[in-house]
Image (cartoon, rainbow, N blue to C red):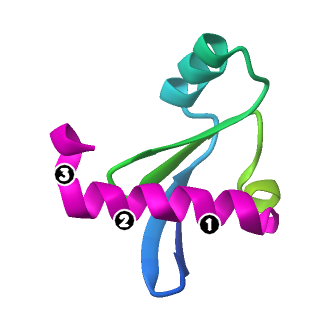
Amino acid sequence: MERVSINNIAFNIKEKSFLAKIATWKLGSTNVAMVLGSTVHLYGVDAAEFLANKKWVKHELCHINQFKQYGFLGF
């Protein structure tokens, strides 16, 4: 697991996440990034590829902020 900080938001990145793997199957996608708490779970993409896609990172940072604001059940 890798620790990253972008725009004063610290988060972890977990590559080859089993939970994200399930999401790829459910969504019919080849790669997924999903947020649980302050961790971005990746499957089908590595951390470097994910971090290079600014739009995707920004999207997941919004989910991290939502988790912080609403908590697990509210999110």
Marks 1 and 2, how far apart at CA: 11 Å
| N-terminal-most mark, 1 or 2 | 1
Q: How many marks?
A: 3
Amino acid type assigned to the residue bearing label 3 in the image: Gly
Q: Secondary structure at mark 3?
A: helix
Image height of 72 relative to 38, above or below: above
Where residue 51 appears, x then y in whole percent?
Answer: 73, 65
**Horizontal placement of 52 versus 36: left or right?**
right
Marks 3 and 1, how far apart at CA: 19 Å
Bounds of the magenta segment: 52-75
| N-terminal-most mark, 3 or 1 | 1
**Category of crowding for the residue at label 3, using alpha-carbon neighbours closer than 10 angstroms: few (below 14), some (14–19), many (at least 20):** few
Amino acid type assigned to the residue bearing label 1 in the image: Lys
For the stretch drawn in magenta, the main secondary structure is helix
> Where does label 1 land, which residue?
58
Label ID, residue 10: none
Label ID, residue 71: 3
Q: Quadrant of the C terminus?
A: top left
Residue 40 among magenta residues: no
* Residue 45 visible in the current orientation: yes
Choose top left, top right, bottom left or bottom right for residue 17: top right
> Where does label 2 land, which residue?
65
Q: Secondary structure at mark 2?
A: helix
**Horizontal placement of 64 versus 52: left or right?**
left
Where residue 58 appears, x then y in whole percent?
Answer: 62, 66
